Amino acid sequence: MVEKRKGNSSEKENSNSGHENGDGKNEVRIVRVESREQVKGSECDCNCLVLPSEQQAKINPRKAWYRCQLGRAFWTLGRFQEALEHFEKACELMPFEPYYRLELAEAYLALNRLDEAISQLEQTVLWAPYDDYYHVRLAAAYLCAGRLEDAIETMEKTVKLSPRNASYHCLLGILYLMKGDEVSAAFHLRFRWQLDQYDISFLRQFQKLCGRSIVLKLLH
């Protein structure tokens, strides 16, 4: 803090205090404070002051959004590899944004890179533990990889997040039927005796997400 003002005419009170005190003790104390507090100085030449500006350059919400839009455009054209590159860049610019991780996972799934997709989705669930959609998406990815037990465990957490959501209970019941656990399946399926159009639409969308790894004929 003293170094930041060393060009000024005063050191709080006396500018010539160092010259008047022949023992030099005050000067020694000031030098020691400068060496410890130089991180806070704006005029220091130390490398540590460069790091915050570098980090700020990396975290750029606007550029990340543009990258995501480019990724979506390539996705629409079916150019998944190019979409993946833009989603990866968006994640670099906004490394702690779950939504961009979700987009990246979608691209990995489209390229059949299941392990990488699951890794990204697991990260989004850690960052957004109370968002049920990320859990549902992760369950679908687990089914793509043939990991039925993990899909069931994830859907159990989803049901706990939204205990009144009949569609989630229905989906979990179907997963238990796929496992062969009819008792658990019956417990969850009792929440909806007759599926309405909303449930059917949700289940068909889930089937699409997980690459038809779930068999909807179990509903009939």
Image: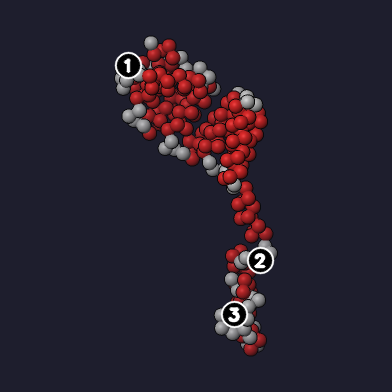
The colour style of the image is secondary structure
Q: Amino acid at mark 3?
A: Glu
Which quadrant of the figure has residue 195?
top left
Q: Which residue is labeled 3 in the image?
A: 11
Which quadrant of the figure has residue 133?
top left
Q: Residue at x 62, y 74 (%)?
A: 5
| Residue 104 x %, y % | 58, 33
Query: Where, quadrant-wise, is the N terminus in this rendering?
Result: bottom right
Estimate the spatial distance between the alpha carbons at disc 3 and disc 1, rounded to whole Å. 82 Å
Q: Amino acid at mark 2?
A: Cys
Q: Is any part of residue 176 visible from this angle? A: no
Estimate the spatial distance between the alpha carbons at disc 3 and disc 2, rounded to whole Å. 18 Å
Q: Residue at x 48, y 19 (%)?
A: 207
* Apparent side of residue 91 relative to residue 189 in the rendered image (left or right): right
Q: Residues within 10 Å of mark 1 (few under 14, many from 20)?
A: few
Q: Which residue is labeled 2 in the image?
A: 44
Disc 3 is placed on an element classified as loop
Q: Residue at x 57, y 40 (%)?
A: 65
Disc 1 is placed on an element classified as loop
Who comes first in sequence, dot 3 or dot 2?
3
Q: Residue at x 56, y 80 (%)?
A: 12
Q: Amino acid at mark 1?
A: Gln
Estimate the spatial distance between the alpha carbons at disc 2 and disc 1, rounded to whole Å. 71 Å
Q: Which residue is labeled 1 in the image?
A: 194
Which quadrant of the figure has residue 35?
bottom right
Who comes first in sequence, dot 3 or dot 1?
3
| Residue 142 x %, y % | 51, 25
